[in-house]
Image (tube, coloured by chain):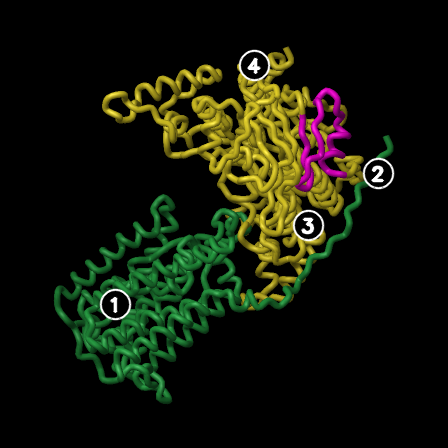
Chain colours: A yellow, B green
Amino acid sequence: MTNEFVLEMKGISKAFPGVKALNDMQFQLKKGEIHALMGENGAGKSTFIKIITGVHQPTEGEMLLVGEKVSFQNPKQAQQHGIAAIYQHVTSYPDLSVTENIFMNHEIRHQVWKTLNWREMHKQARQLLRELGSSLDPKAQMNTLSVAQQQIVEIAKAISTKAKIIIMDEPTAALTARESEELYRITEKLRDEGTSIIFISHRFEDMYRLASRVTVLRDSNYIGTWDVEDISNEKLIVAMVGREINQIFPDKKTSAGETVLEVKNLCKLGEFEDISFSIKSGEILGMTGLVGAGRTEVCQAIFGITAFDKGEILLSGRSIRNKNPQAAMNNGIGYLAEDRLDQGLLVDWSIEKNITLANLSDLSSFTWIHRDKEKRQAKEFGEKVHIKATSIFDSVNSLSGGNQQKVAVAKLLTKELKVILLDEPTKGVDIGAKAAIYEIVQQLAEAGYAVLFVSSEMPEILGMSDRILVLKEGRIAADFVNRGITQEMILEAAMGEEQVQEKSG
Amino acid sequence: MEQKKQTYQPRTLETNLPFSWKRLFFQWEWMLLLILIAVLLLGSYVSPYFLNYPSLRDGTMVFLDKALIVFPMAMIMIMRDIDISVGSTVALSSVVMATLYTSAGLPMEVAIIACLATGAICGLINGLLIVKFKELSAVIVTLGTMILYRGIAYIILEDQAAGGFPEWFGFFGWGYVFGIPFLLIVFAALALLFGIVLHKTTFGRKVFAIGNNPTASRFSGIKVDKVKVIVFMLAGLLAAVTAIFLTSRMGSTRPNIATMYELDIIAMAALGGVSTAGGKGRVLGVVIAVFIIGYLQYGLGLINLPSQIFLIIVGALLILSVAIPKLGGMMKRK
């Protein structure tokens, strides 16, 4: 047998009591290859990754590392064999320094005294970061860094353990276009140095940009491996979803009504300045810009989570001041938080209790909750947004990302709202669920809501919006009517001309 | 390209859970009931005066006074907070009441109202501090007020006792209504009230929601700070009610009464199944746990065992109560 493959998996299966989490998986990873792994949430990707990294042991099949049979009993063994993983939600120690994070569990000790050799570790950390093209201070505390910077630290950590195989689990999910570009560059650099990379992502652009081959999983089954050059978008979607999605974005058939929300000269020192826009009933206003451009801050100020310094918010011509989210909702404004797990949902709770949480007063008399009414409302709104579950008592953390998002939307729908602010509603959900969420957003507009649709992803901004607002450093950089607008035009507004030229050059 | 609108197969969500024996019996409360029976049997084994109705009935008077605070404490713990100042609040409320009656010469009725007000204000201060200074944890804030309230009690009364209350005041600690101790009736009424509030009303739902995810609760329109302040105030108020019963039973008060009450109360709530990580707990479990710890203390007192033994047993029970569900979880996973 040749050692063409650094990692080879033959017929790997993993069964948990009652569930087959992975079935007859085939996988081959070449040296110096970027191999994309795709599939919807729950397709078995994480199980597969956990087997490679030694978290789970396969029930069947064999795993070969450079031609030799291996079986990892724990993550430490996998690490010793040169396998490292970088996760979407960075698993770092936020209160420790960059150096400490990089050398966690394999610290450098002084040769004589056996004490920690900080000087050497800082030096090596700086060196590793510089090799990755980053000028981060090794002494900086981890939680002062952006997600993108933290990921670079995680990559540095992987390199410091002399990893030959690096698994990246949705690394670009929380990154802006520019940061993703930086990550692509680093990933390609690692590849050129002979490291093999398994790259998991929901973003097609990641795959086309980086990977040479792609392996697709669906419903715990291995579907196939293709050269990226040979597979079309449509074929890939069919492989992942198992059915054709003829059209990701729904048809527009709404005509905008009267102006509902009007924001005038909204200012908050250090966050945003002079934000003015209006949304009509039935209209979808796209809002984009780099992360940190102030999109979430604007939404949260409108929703009453944070205060703003100056400006005015008008609802149907009437000036309103939202002291807190409750006041905002009573005024008819709803907000779908960007981070659905931390800000949107009570993940240990049932679908039912999550849906009704914002609307308890309507389901109760003298604060006594009527369970029948509550169940009925949960069922009604849960079915309205097509949550895939068996009963309203299923807990939210048993659902896929897309279905969790639907629960969060259903909760908003229980209130009588006029305006819905959607902050990155499709973040981290798979393609099938994305299409479903787009459908819901479109239905909201058709039902007469004024929708603010915030997203970093250009295709969905272009595919969904009637008008597009581009923020740059807390200010409105452009206000487009979505007709003949291209990604380049948006990028140009979001980043400034020089950077776009740099990118295309 | 011809475009076709996507269709989804309609899905229905079930709204009835099928009956399940496992769900009925796989509850922490059954475990607590077994422990309570074990405690009662143990009590009858060590003392012939323990296991009979008058003994068990009158025994409640010894421990139920502090158990009144366990209900708001459970709410506080469900919200991931803690209040260790309740013992000091009992002492301060009691001292204020006694001083107003004996030294200031006010009517006892007025002194009682002042006692309740003192407790509520103590709780309000705790709540406001915790809500306004988010970087401070509840344990630090209430550690501060625990020392503060106790200190004020000492300044008011110095290291003396105050007593000589009117005769009718003794009813709180020693009175019976239809042969049932008044304290037991109050406890049962509060258990029912808090059970309803916590499990059946919007307020209780909000308490659980906050314990589960404070940020998501706020984003869902719950006034998190308001709920917290109310619950801490309730704890202070119930501490004052405890002060009335305790002072009545003892006939006099000192600034050092109700020392370490907070530990017994937290132990009762934790043993009763209130999760220290927040978000979980039931009044029924807490009530059973109150009787477990109470009768344990009472039974050991009957045979004159040193109180240290009681502490050891309560400590062991607490650790067990945290460990057993974990062990169960591990067995399920294997």
Residue type highlighted by circle 3: Lys
Q: Are marks 3 and 2 on the same chain?
A: no
Outermost residue, right side: B2
* In this picture, residue B252 sits left or right of residue A315: left
In the rendered view, would you say A376 is above or below A420?
below
Q: Are marks 4 and 2 on the same chain?
A: no
Q: Are marks 4 and 3 on the same chain?
A: yes
Outermost residue, top side: A505
| Element on which disc 2 rests | loop
Measure the C-alpha gap from mark 4 to mark 2. Answer: 44 Å
Residue type highlighted by circle 4: Asp
Measure the C-alpha gap from mark 1 to mark 4. Answer: 68 Å
For the residues bearing labels 2 and 1, Cβ distance under 8 angstroms: no
Task: Pinpoint the chain carrying mark 2.
Answer: B
For the residues bearing labels 1 and 3, Cβ distance under 8 angstroms: no
**Which residue range is magenta in the image?**
A214-242
Q: Which residue is mark 1?
A: B310
Which comes sooner in the sequence, label 4 or label 3?
A: 4
Q: Which residue is mark 3?
A: A388
Front disc: 1 or 3: 1
Q: Is residue A234 magenta?
A: yes
Mark 2 neighbour class, 10 Å CA radius: few under 14, some 14 to 19, many 20 or more: few
Mark 3 neighbour class, 10 Å CA radius: few under 14, some 14 to 19, many 20 or more: some
For the residues bearing labels 1 and 4, Cβ distance under 8 angstroms: no
Q: Horizontal and vertical percent for residue A52?
A: 55, 33
Q: Which residue is mark 4?
A: A192
Q: Which residue is mark 2?
A: B4
Q: Horizontal and vertical percent for residue A408?
A: 61, 48
Measure the C-alpha gap from mark 3 to mark 2. Answer: 22 Å
User: In terms of image quadrants, where is residue B176?
Assistant: bottom left
Measure the C-alpha gap from mark 2 to mark 1. Answer: 74 Å
